[in-house]
Image: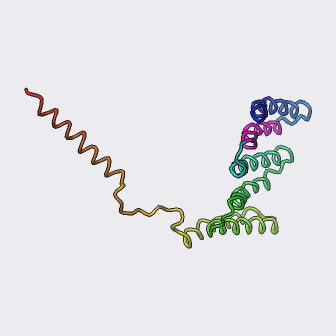
Amino acid sequence: MRKRIIAAMPMISLVLFLFSGLYLDNWKLGWVFFLLIPLSWILFSRHVFKRLNDMLPVLALFIFLILGFGFDLWHPGWVVFLLVPVFNTILEKRITPKKLVNIVVIGAFIGISFYLDEWHPTWLILFLIPIINTIFFPYDGFKVKTNYTNNWEEKIKKFVNDKVVVNHEKDDEDEDF
């Protein structure tokens, strides 16, 4: 049944698009229904947590487009994209200090912006995320170079020196002019 629904979803999206355009006279809103195609694939996968984690960006885009095309709320609608990392953190059930900084700063941005009804200067608060994470948690995302023998550059040099140069020298010795 899952495969049949996924296979029928392009046709269902097309019918909803035509209904929205012809009967509701809103062609722009109709384009949103084509997002049901990847959303159906995600919804009918067998892994629950992977399904929820993969669905969040598509769902945020779906909500944003409905708010924009349907209600002409483009400006506050983009805030739904900020909820994606917050929900991913909640779904993973593991809050690291870096993720906690993200949640607190995004929450402060949304709260202050709604309270003051000023979105333009308050977006500068979002610069606190990389600043705080760089100062207080610098090595979480970086790989520290260690001195181990599994260096790929040295392996390539050794291969070139052993195989190519040695074989080339043998070929030169075999040739008599």
Q: Residue at x 73, y 62 (%)?
A: 120
Residue 33 colored in magenta in the image: yes
Asked whether 173 falls inside the magenta stretch, the response is no
List x then y, in percent, for residue 154. 31, 52
> Residue pushed farthest right?
23
Nearer-the-camera pick, 10 or 66: 10
Q: Position of residue 57 (x, y in %)?
A: 71, 49
**Main secondary structure of the magenta stretch:** helix
Residue at the image position 58 percent from the left and 68 percent from the top: 133
Instruction: From this view, report whether residue 101 is shown above or below residue 20.
Output: below
Q: Position of residue 96 (x, y in %)?
A: 63, 67
Residue that protrudes farthest toward the bottom in the picture: 136
Q: Is residue 41 left or right of residue 175?
A: right
Q: Is residue 25 above or below residue 161?
A: above
When asked about the image quadrant of residue 135, the answer is bottom right
* Residue placed most toward the observer, 164 or 65: 164
**Residue found at the very far left of the displayed protein:** 177
- Image: magenta residue range: 28-44
**Dividing the image into 4 quarters, which one contains the N terminus?**
top right
At 92% from the left and 32% from the top, the residue drawn is 23
Quarter occupied by the C terminus: top left
Q: Is the residue 36 above or below the residue 120 in the image?
A: above
Numbered circles on residues, count: 0
Q: Answer with left or right where residue 170 lies relative to residue 27.
A: left
What residue is shown at x 81% (from left), y 68% (from top)?
116
Q: Nearer the viewer, residue 13 or 130?
A: 13
Q: Position of residue 155 (x, y in %)?
A: 32, 49
Q: Quadrant of residue 70?
A: top right
